[in-house]
Image: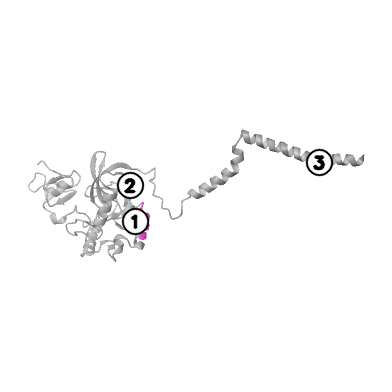
Amino acid sequence: MNHRFLQSILSLIVIIPIILSGCSNSEVSKEKRNNPTISNSKSSEVNAKETHETKSPSPSEEVPKIINANMKLLSATIAKNVDGDTVDINLNGKIEKVRMLCVDTPETHHPRLGVQPFGPEASDYTKKILSVGTKVEIEPGIGEGRDKYGRLLAYIYVDGKMFNEMLLEQGLARVAYIYAPNTQYVDEFYAIQKKAQKKGVGIWSIENYAQEDGYNTDNAKETDKKVADSETSAGTTSGSNYQNNPSDDQETNLDCKGKIKGNANSHIYHVPGGSYYASTTDNIVWFCSEKEAQDEGYRKSKR
């Protein structure tokens, strides 16, 4: 009697866990059918982790600089390439000449300095990236935003990246003409220039060529220093009175002084003997010929 009782008890001990296990599995299977995501939750977490790790950019990947949404930008179209650091744009139906802020490329057709090393390369690079018809965004300089020639001083963005920086990256420009209040990107500009110097690309491939006061070719360094000294003594150094070094741009064209006189604000030129030739005294741009003035977008005075 006792022996049979013990056997019954042992049988129950063995059968009960099996029944419970079956119920548990049945409930789980039912829950899986009602909510299929439960069965794959763990594998989904693993896959998500693997996908995240796969898509993470490597440290060597260079992410383009994204334009700040709060930045005041003006939409425009490139209308003409002048040289490496100067372009004409179509801004709201008006042609504006833009001089890029805080950078300086070597000259290509200066009446006195001629063609400087890497001037053509800088000009060609600008023509390639900022070709006529290219859609760009313009960030005007702080203050009046123009130089004494009436040119718009600005940073240019193409495809979300600042072109001023791109010139520095390629070693086709140096950091120059840093005047308050347009100093917000100076540290970044110098950091980019330092990398180009270390690589020895472009203007930095020629020893002692690019200097703080200009490009050292054909006594240009000495001339630039004299001009810079004269500008400093005249008090034309900062704020909205941004001044380019006269040896920097074709528009100064001092060899043609006394010939065709253009007004940088009105974009009207006057010939000797004209009614307004003598009275035009501000924002003067000199041209050697009427064709040169017309090529720069100036029209002849009617009187």
Q: Is residue 127 toward the left or the right of residue 19 in the image?
A: left
Highlighted range, magenta: 184-195
Of the numbered discs 1 and 2, the one sitting upstream in the chain is 2
Crowding near pointer 1: few (<14 within 10 Å), some, many (20+)? many
Q: Measure how far apart labels 2 and 3 are at the Cα level.
A: 80 Å
Q: Secondary structure at mark 1?
A: helix
Q: State the residue position of label 2.
A: 157
Residue depicted at x 58% and y 44%: 43
Q: State the residue position of label 1.
A: 169
Q: Amino acid at mark 1?
A: Glu
Residue 172, horizontal then vertical, whole percent? 29, 57
Q: Measure how far apart labels 1 and 2 are at the Cα level.
A: 15 Å
Comparing labels 2 and 3, the label whose residue is closer to the camera: 3
Which quadrant would the C terminus be assigned to in this image?
top left
Q: Residue 117 appears in which quarter of the rendering?
A: bottom left
Crowding near pointer 2: few (<14 within 10 Å), some, many (20+)? many
Residue depicted at x 75% and y 40%: 18
